[in-house]
Structure formats: C-alpha cells, structure tokens
Image (cartoon, helix red, strand yellow):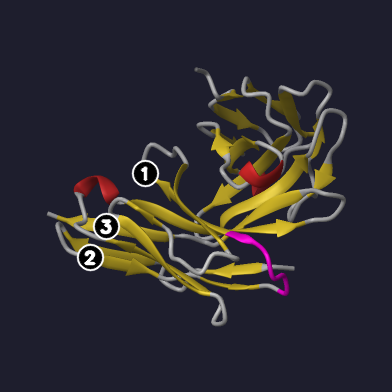
Amino acid sequence: AQTVTQSQPEMSVQEAETVTLSCTYDTSESDYYLFWYKQPPSRQMILVIRQEAYKQQNATENRFSVNFQKAAKSFSLKISDSQLGDAAMYFCAYRSYSGAGSYQLTFGKGTKLSVIP
Amino acid sequence: NAGVTQTPKFRVLKTGQSMTLLCAQDMNHEYMYWYRQDPGMGLRLIHYSVGEGTTAKGEVPDGYNVSRLKKQNFLLGLESAAPSQTSVYFCASSHFGPLFGKLFFGSGTQLSVL
C-alpha cells in the first residue's frame, strides 16, 4: 500500500518570508499524481497544487510551487512571500490505483503552518 | 453552487446509538468518498464509491456501512456508535478519469460519541 509521510507536524514562518513543507511517499507505480491540500481553521479543504509524475517540470501556482524529486520520492511545497492567510494545516496526498479502474487519495498526517506577523 | 453538502454539521451520540450521515453533491461526479479526520492522523478513507450502486472499503471501514442508491447521494451509517468513532467526518466527490484528484469536500461533520 502507498504511504505518505509528512515529517514536520508543525512549522512557522515570518510574514513575507519563504517556507518549505516536506513530503515523501512510497510507491511502486510509475505514473501517479501528487497533491497539496490546505485546510484553514474553517475546516474547508482547498486544493493548492497538483503534480503529474510523468511531468518533469515542477508545478507552480502563484506563490506556491513544488520541488518534485521522482527518484527520491519527495514532493515538497514551497510558499513564497508568506501571508497571514496561509496559516493552515497542509496535507500532502497521493493518488493510488485501487483496482477495477478506481482510484483513491491517500493523505499524509499534515503539517500545521503558523505565520508570524 | 451548492457543491458538496453534508448533514448534519454536528452531532452527539451515546455509545450504542445509530445514525446516518448524508452527503449530497450536485456536480454529477462519479466518485464519492467518506474520510475521517483525527488529530495527528490526517484524513483516513473509510469507504468510497466509483458510481451509483457501488461501494468499496477504504483504510478504516470497520464499524461503518455505506450506500450509494443515487448518484448524487452517499450515506455513511454507524450501526452502534463507539467512543473511538468520535471524529470529524468529511465527504468528498470527484470526476472520473484524468480530472481525478481534485476532490471537492463538504464542510465536515463533528461527531462526538459519549
């Protein structure tokens, strides 16, 4: 079974600075998708960024970018110019094939990010 | 746009009681999921469905049952609630195929079992 590991339960960053959240995963698949989701105190789950494994280019979405290292099975999230609204739980997720044409997302345990004014 | 709607938002049960959580989506999604979120554990998949009339077990299915009689609805049942089922429950849905991965989540149900 695929596993997703987020080794940093909590992180903090000064407003306007840059922070990197780590994620590693274990898989035997060659084609897969990876995601970062954000969960603010409102409890809403928001997709931040998505990376297809077959693409060598790292995905970017405005201030959010990833460092995807396929051989190392590493998928870190970089947040630039951190804002107070970035304070949230961040979950790394892996799309795994569960047979019969169906897929599911496996989530890491999350990293709580605090932004210091 | 309603998206994914979960009812109820909060519920308190006594041990041994039963209840059903309802999830409804209006996006014509094929896939629907039930996750539970516990502190320090992330989101863990309970059951999921890849289409009307189909269900499958996820990572933590014990003590739960599900049904998908209509494409837009996915019900999660607790037949005999236990304190270990105190959690926040999330329903989610997604498209089939290459768009899969972007899950649309409901706002969650806070369940406490005393």
Q: Dot 2 corresponds to which residue?
A: A18
Q: Are marks 3 and 1 in contact (CB under 8 Å)?
A: no
**Percent of width and height locating residue B98:** 66, 46
Q: Real-space Cα distance between discs 2 and 3?
A: 12 Å
**Percent of width and height locating residue A108:** 55, 62
| Crowding at mark 3 (Cα within 10 Å: few <14, some 14-19, many 20+) | many
- The quadrant the N terminus of chain A occupies is bottom right
Q: Is residue A10 left or right of residue B36?
A: left
Q: Residue at x 59, y 65 (%)?
A: A53
Work out whether mark 2 precedes mark 3 in sequence or the reverse, and give the earlier one.
Answer: 2
Residue type at the position of mark 2 = Thr
Secondary element under disc 1, as helix, strand or loop, is: loop
**Both labels 3 and 1 in a single chain:** yes
Q: Which numbered circle lies on residue A114? A: 3
Q: Residue at x 71, y 39 (%)?
A: B96
Q: Mark 3 belongs to which subunit? A: A
- The quadrant the C terminus of chain A occupies is bottom left
Work out whether mark 2 precedes mark 1 in sequence or the reverse, and give the earlier one.
Answer: 2
Magenta-highlighted residues = A28-33
Q: Which numbered circle lies on residue A40? A: 1
